[in-house]
């Protein structure tokens, strides 16, 4: 029942918005439903701590510690995003950037998007997981195209075509894996159940498993935004409304990555750890290199954050490649810290088009002196994304470096961290261009005066995300146990 | 139906799917390309019905029926409407010339057969013999997505890729239940409708379906 509630509760506001349109009371049902989802996620997390697997409906839905951990991350970012959505859409309506119909569509699609992510995590069957991930593409297509101008149309076209083709390859990989499972004795009814696949992983034909693993990595890797399948990501993440960018960058990428993690344990059992490790290291290095070079010459602040997401997905790919328990723990810590950091960054930067009329880096110069509150939040979020102490990403990257050397992957670890250093330097360079320096005169300060002080519906979620991020860097607290349990699933 | 006839009919239908994928690579007329897609969908449905009839599996026959409705009737109708709504350009030039695309398709077919040798050997059966054709359709359609720069042709390319995968799914008897198969089809239909709406917006904003207009977002 708990699992079913986790899928139904987030959907309620979609119905409310569909019926009544976007209005203040409806907007707050989004926040209420998100808070209820978070409460349910916490209950689920407590239930799976002793490594029980929660099931519903004969295994149609299932949740282990890994699923519960990811559900928790989705629920946290979901709450932050829906909270900031309330003011964001109101401001967009007030400034004529969207219409009541556009706001209604937004309010209906965001809950669908969140519910699709939760289904992907809670499905008991790999094909249902695939359907849910494809569902996220369908649900977000019009969110990316929310602004309805030429740029957002271009972004949503690339997003849907590249994402769907990538996921089609993932489906092919799923079928090939099912074929191998059938040959290894699974029945056609259970060949794609996660439980069955995990149980018979070691008996699968190695060559077929390798073919499936390659296709799955290419397919879901497209959705994660790993290079060289990343080309849609900067466009989509920069064109979407800020709360949606936060959800896409902060959690959707990681949800798709968690699917790769599940398949990886199965492929590794069949074909040995070397195969997926090699592919993942190549993709990790490519992603980091692409992110570093394109962040350095970047002219737009939102695209800068999108490339930073590619960078962090590269780090996740390397952590998965290392594959030890320490690396898995570092990976999961990285997931939650990146989710919080990227949410804060996108929420804050997403306010710039309203506050400053632009997201072009050259026109933002000196933001910290001009808008201390907003600029300060951007500064803190970027410090967190740079992997500097005291924030969580510092701890996860440090642990990952240790795990890499422990696993006798010294050269790869050194190479990955060298490129990561370059990417960090690029982001630091751009951050100082945005935040410091003499301010350039803004376009029309009269017109923007209304938005002089940041709204509370932005600042509350923004500051909460930053505080949570700071706490994560100091102590994991009660999360530690869940993280360990989840890490044991990622690295057996 | 004897095993031999069954094997030959499966091979024939799979062959039609490959030929359709190759034709779509170089045809110029948009409506012709949509009709080729419908023909490929029909061949796919034939494969599902054949498998169902031979193994007395009602669910495979039902899947075949669903393919007829979705891939032969509904989706081509949606796409033909997009073509009808384009006022000026109902033709699209391929980026690469005809002979190159055909050589490319031939190479990809060979690659598909080579890459799936292990798969066929894993569980020999008449269905397994036709599996590589499904992979060939996937690769050729992927090639088509790269060499064609028109919104409608890209959607057709994506759908052909999907047809190839559906053929593999049916032939592999992958253990995908009818419900899941329906949900996959629904996802596909939604994706096509999204793309249809986006291409309609493209018509109004850019006055055409050529993707060279998409050039604002670069680094």
Image (cartoon, coloured by chain):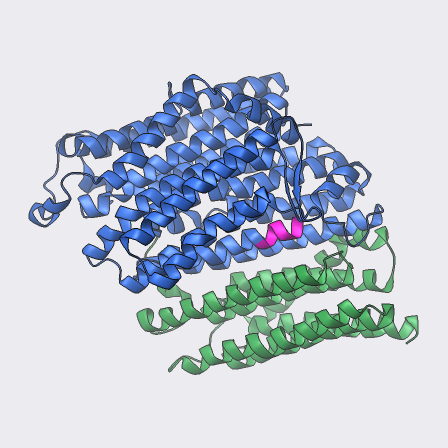
Measuring 36% from the left and 56% from the top, which residue is drawn there?
A106
Report which quarter residue A258 is drawn in. Answer: top right
The answer to whether B58 appears left or right of A247 in the picture is right
Q: Does any portion of residue B95 appear in the rendered image? A: yes
Count of marks, rendered view = 0
The answer to which of A471 and A26 lies nearer the viewer is: A26
Of the 4 image quadrants, the one containing the N terminus of chain A is: top right
Residue A128: in magenta span: yes
Q: Which chain is green?
A: B
Report which quarter residue A319 is drawn in. Answer: top right
Residue A448 coordinates in the image, percent (x, y): 12, 47
Q: Quick check: A216 above or below A405?
A: below
Q: Which chain is blue?
A: A
Residue B111 coordinates in the image, percent (x, y): 71, 56
Q: Quick check: A179 above or below A283?
A: below
Q: Quick check: A355 above or below A143?
A: above
Q: Does any portion of residue A290 appear in the rendered image? A: no
The answer to whether A150 appears left or right of A260 in the picture is left
Residue B42 coordinates in the image, percent (x, y): 68, 77
Residue A230 coordinates in the image, percent (x, y): 47, 46
Q: Quick check: A276 above or below B122?
A: above
Residue A285: in magenta span: no
The answer to whether B164 appears left or right of A304 in the picture is right
Measuring 35% from the left and 31% from the top, which residue is drawn there?
A465
* Most common secondary structure along the magenta stretch: helix
Measuring 53% from the left and 21% from the top, which residue is drawn there?
A480
What residue span does the magenta drawing correspond to? Answer: A126-131
Measuring 10% from the left and 50% from the top, which residue is drawn there?
A447
Of the 4 image quadrants, the one containing the C terminus of chain A is: top right
């Amino acid at each position: 029942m708990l699992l079913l509630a986790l899928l139904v509760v987030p959907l309620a506001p979609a119905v409310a918005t569909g019926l009544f349109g976007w209005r203040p009371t409806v907007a707050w049902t989004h926040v209420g439903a998100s808070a209820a989802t978070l409460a349910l996620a916490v209950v689920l997390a407590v239930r799976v701590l002793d490594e029980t697997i929660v099931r519903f409906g004969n295994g149609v839905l299932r949740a282990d510690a890994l699923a519960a951990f990811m559900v928790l991350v989705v629920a946290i970012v979901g709450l932050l995003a829906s909270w900031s959505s309330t003011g964001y859409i109101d401001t967009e309506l007030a400034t004529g950037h969207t219409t009541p119909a556009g706001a209604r569509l937004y309010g209906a699609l965001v809950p669908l998007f969140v519910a699709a992510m939760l289904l992907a995590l809670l499905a008991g069957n790999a094909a249902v997981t695939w359907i849910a991930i494809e569902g996220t593409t369908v649900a977000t297509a019009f969110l990316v195209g929310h602004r309805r101008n030429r740029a957002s149309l271009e972004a949503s076209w690339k997003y849907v075509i590249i994402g769907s083709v990538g996921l089609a390859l993932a489906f092919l990989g799923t079928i090939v894996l099912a074929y191998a499972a059938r040959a290894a004795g699974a029945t056609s009814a259970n060949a794609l159940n996660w439980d069955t696949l995990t149980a018979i992983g070691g008996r699968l034909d190695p060559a077929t498993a390798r073919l499936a693993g390659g296709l799955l990595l290419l397919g879901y890797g497209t959705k994660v935004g790993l290079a060289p399948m990343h080309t849609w990501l900067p466009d989509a993440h920069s064109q979407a409304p800020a709360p949606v960018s936060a959800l896409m960058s902060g959690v959707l990428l990681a949800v798709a990555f968690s699917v790769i993690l599940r398949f990886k344990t199965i492929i590794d059992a069949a074909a040995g750890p070397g195969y997926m490790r090699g592919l993942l290291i190549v993709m990790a290095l490519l992603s980091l290199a692409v992110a570093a070079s394109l962040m350095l010459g970047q002219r737009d602040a939102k695209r800068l954050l999108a490339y930073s997401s590619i960078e962090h997905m590269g780090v996740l790919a390397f952590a998965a490649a290392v594959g030890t328990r320490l690396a898995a723990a570092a990976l999961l810590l990285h997931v939650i810290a990146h989710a919080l950091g990227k949410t804060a960054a996108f929420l804050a930067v997403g306010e710039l088009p309203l506050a400053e009329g632009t997201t072009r880096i050259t026109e933002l110069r000196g933001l910290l002196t001009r808008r201390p509150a907003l600029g300060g939040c951007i500064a803190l979020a970027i410090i967190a994304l740079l992997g500097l102490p005291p924030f969580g990403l510092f701890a996860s990257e440090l642990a990952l470096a240790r795990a890499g050397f422990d696993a006798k992957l010294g050269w790869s670890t050194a190479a990955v961290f060298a490129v990561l250093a370059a990417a960090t330097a690029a982001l630091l360079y751009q951050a100082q261009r945005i935040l410091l320096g003499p301010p350039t005169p803004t376009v029309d300060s009269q017109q923007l005066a209304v938005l002089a002080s940041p709204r509370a519906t932005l600042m509350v979620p923004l500051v909460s995300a930053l505080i949570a991020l700071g706490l994560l860097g100091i102590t994991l607290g009660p999360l530690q146990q869940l993280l360990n349990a989840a890490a044991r699933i990622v690295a057996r | 139906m004897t095993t031999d006839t069954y094997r030959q009919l499966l091979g024939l239908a799979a062959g039609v799917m490959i030929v359709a994928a190759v034709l779509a690579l170089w045809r110029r007329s948009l409506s012709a390309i949509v009709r080729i897609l419908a023909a490929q969908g029909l061949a796919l449905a034939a494969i599902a019905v054949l498998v169902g009839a031979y193994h007395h599996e009602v669910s495979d026959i039902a899947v075949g029926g669903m393919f007829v409705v979705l891939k032969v009737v509904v989706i081509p109708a949606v796409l033909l409407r997009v073509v009808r709504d384009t006022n000026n350009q109902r033709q699209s030039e391929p980026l690469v010339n005809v002979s190159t695309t055909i050589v490319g398709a031939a190479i990809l077919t060979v690659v598909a057969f080579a890459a799936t040798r292990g798969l066929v050997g894993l569980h020999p059966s008449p269905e397994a013999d036709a599996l590589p054709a499904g992979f060939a359709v996937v690769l050729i359609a992927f090639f088509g997505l790269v060499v064609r720069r028109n919104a409608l042709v890209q959607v057709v390319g994506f759908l052909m890729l999907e047809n190839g995968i559906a053929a593999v799914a049916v032939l592999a008897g992958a253990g995908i239940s009818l419900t899941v198969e329906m949900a996959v089809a629904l996802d596909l239909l939604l994706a096509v409708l999204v793309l249809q709406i986006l291409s309609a917006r493209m018509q109004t904003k850019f006055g055409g379906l050529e993707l060279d207009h998409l050039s604002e977002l670069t680094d």
